[in-house]
Image (tube, coloured by chain):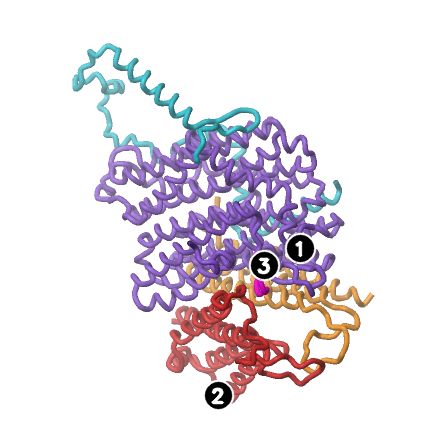
Chain colours: A purple, B red, C cyan, D orange
Amino acid sequence: MIPEFILSNAPALLIGVPLLGAFLSPLIGRLSRDARALWVLAIITLTTLIGYLVAFLAYTKGTLIYVFGAATPALSIPPDSGGIPIRIILTLDALSALMVIMTVTVGFSVIVYSLSSDSRRSGLEAYYTLFLLLIASVLGMFATGDLFNFFVFLEISSLAAAGLVAYKVEKGRAVEAGLKFLMVSAIGGVFFLLAIGILYGQYNALNIAMLAGMIQWTPLDKLALVLIIAALAAKCGSVPMHFWTPDAYSMAPAAVTAMLVVVSQASLYGLFRFCFTLYGLALTYGVIGWALIVLGVLSMVVGVTMAIPQKDIKRLMAYHSVSQTGYMLLGVGVGLAVLGDQALLGSFGITAMEGGIFHILNNALYKGLLFLTAGAIILRIGTSDMNRMGGLGHNMKWTMILFIIGALAIAGIPPFNGFASKFLIYESVFAFNPVLSIIAMVVSILTLASFVKVFHSVFMGPQLPEYADVSEAPGSMLIGMAILSGLVIITGLFPEFFVQHLIAPAAHALADPSGYLAAVLGGA
Amino acid sequence: MLMRMSKIVRFAADLLYPGILIFGLYVIMHGHLTPGGGFQGGAVIATAVALVAVAYSYDEVLAMVRKLRFIVQESGGLVLFLGIALAAVALGTTVFANYLANTGMLFGLAVPFGPNPGELNTGGVMPLMNIAVGLEVWGALALVVLYMLSGIREKEA
Amino acid sequence: MVSGAPLSSGFGIWNPLLWLVVFVIGLIIAYAVWRSGFSGYRTGSGRGRPYLSGNEEPSKGDVHIRAGNMYWGFTEGIKGYYEQVIPLHTGILTDNLLWIFWVAGILLIVVMVI
Amino acid sequence: MFLNLPLVVVVLLALIGIATILLKRNLVKIIFGVTILTSSVNLFLVTLAYREGGIAPIYTLAPADVMVLPTPHALTLTNIVIGVATTALMLSFAVIIHRRYGTVNIDEIRELRE
């Protein structure tokens, strides 16, 4: 059914297709606006299909590898190389596949949304180029099996995202946000590259699987891990390095903000990948696990308390992003803290990791949805200041319904997906340390409280005279939001299906990297 | 308005421009034999554009070249690079495979063994990729220079 | 394909479909209770109007609580916390960058000592 | 002794870069600081590649001797390219910020805070 050359080259096409789309879109954009819109839509559809194909292959056939430039795609160690993987290798295990699914899903709905929300701006050729470049680089971060390639894709995503954050350049504030984001990314990138240099200097390898087999936990390795954690925690917006998050999220166009959520979770993926797969065989688990837990708890508490007094709708949601990142760090951090103890890991560690990973997927869906609804509101009334909003429920009924779905999901109200993942986190973390679980629940209540505030002040109340002739958001924006809200409901109603088939393999792949190593190094 | 350097500077820029251009093209073409390659050669050429931009006023530079040319060059270079890489899929090998090496076709001679003065017609797809990258960097860095210059000009006005 | 098995955490289970059934049953019970109530309420008789010490009721638009005033009590209650945290968000670029160095430094000390 | 000299320079450069980033108030100087910091990492990578007695991995007229592995050089080159792009973007942002805010003092570029 699917041609063989696509099947065997799917991982490379996953990155190649959006890149090709990105580079051709300025040329096609010169023909006409419609041609560009069609081209971008075609490219993102193709990318989405390839993404699902790659994920399907990775889940059914086990860890997928793709070697650039080799005679066959799976030839990771050529016979004349002396047992060393020398080429650039893409490695996709279950966790990467899950992240690819998340990226292409959110990317597709965001592009569909963006086709009408941003259709009247100038400078669109750069916008779509950067957008597709951003998607390609995030997919590259998930797919790569090479430390240095991860760095390259990280930097490409930083540059593309910074350009997109500062896209509304006529406002000086957007540029300020872009500068802050880029500066944090640049420092993070330097840290990360220094860590790569330290590891390469000791072990003469850059391949993650190759390094994982050799890593020792010497003081230099410790330094490298600390640098990696600091860089990626800053990039994923964990407290106390979250200051760029509200700035960048609130100033970027809504579609970009929804994608930025995925980008910051790509850094989170990197953090988990390097802690578990790269250092998993050498790590003293407790310290690093607790470091992630502390970062996570700080993010949860500070994020949500800072969100409550906010007046700008997207800034408020951005602080919630920080808070939700805390849940993921908490869940996976608990898993890391007990990774060495098989009994504890089996009793609650894996469940905590499943909760954390499930929350990554859920967060990308409902957070994307919420930012898109905020973008629809801002598009229609022209302000993001909640003090000047009110009574929009009369005119924007569909947006209101979609917002309610997202808000209930993020607050962890059953039967939406936020509850399912938070349920896993609460119960397993309670077995680890009850205090952490109670903090997580209180944060969830505060999340609900602050979204009640948004709902009340934006949609409730009498119709305001200045917004009497506000109309509903355009159709393609509603389609983009409806895709995400439909997925929020489906993952909420059938969590056991998703956990069993998608999340549990990912959590096991993270906890036990031997499959990852064996795929690259050949059964070692 | 007419922010331009003296005649001496402009004459020197005129004199240096072809030299820099040829050196940049040399670096691009010999990327697979000597240190350098697409990025370095493209950057060298872009300095020539920057030199002209500094010596002449912004309007004069815009009269000499069009931004569209650089945009096409930038995108075209990247598409060429990716196209060469993805063409391997159509030929039945993996992406980025060197399907031209040792075929006797374009850049397809076998590399002579031992110390040798360097045979330009070797390297397979690598010289082609260097050319693609060179075109891209040339266009992109020239665009960066021109856009920054336009930013400064708006401030002066 | 989609099984009805509940999501299990090892300590408890969560079945959204069952929850939905219970929720709908709850709604039906609530509706039944509501139906069985006394229906002597007359609309338009002014019974539903608020009594504000005899003053006229202001229009709905004037009493709509805008976002900035919501949760005033909450923020006032933990004012001490907010006075500590909000000044950290200075918005100055170098402060943001300094925090990365702080985190890396503290983490390095912790990891090296333990 | 002299083999460690490049590493001393790496640390020195990194400290200069960090000090520039954290102590200077001028945005353009901070961008220079980031560039210096990136250069220190580049120098670190190049230092890693050095092998005593090794020759450059260029086959043109190469003597028959031990060549060094060019991977760190490739890493350095890639990072230089990324550094160029980052610096160009940052400087463009600085130009626009100077036009909108009328200043490059980062203590005054803080409209986004709290």
Front of the two marks 2 and 3: 3
Residue at image position (64%, 40%) is A291
Q: Amino acid at mark 3?
A: Asn
Mark 3, secondary structure of its residue: helix
CA distance for labels 2 and 3: 41 Å
| Chain of residue at mark 2 | B
Does residue A469 sit above or below D63 in this rendering?
A: above
Q: Which residue lies at the image location 66% right of the left edge and 55% below the top edge?
A: A195
Using the rendered image, report if marks 1 and 2 lie on a common chain: no
Q: Is residue A183 visible?
A: yes
Start-end of magenta stretch: A66-73
Q: Judge if badges 2 and 3 mark residues of a common chain.
A: no
Compute the Cα span from label 1 to label 2.
46 Å
For disc 2, the marked residue is B14
Q: Which mark is residue D86?
A: none
Which residue is at the far right?
Answer: D1
| Residue B133 falls left or right of residue A228 | left
Residue at image mark 1: A195
Do the CB atoms of the residues marked 2 and 3 lie less than 8 Å apart?
no
Residue drawn at the location 25% of the way across and 20% of the way down: C50
Where does residue C16 sit, x and y in percent of width and height? Answer: 43, 28
Q: What is the three-letter code of the residue carrying label 1?
A: Ala
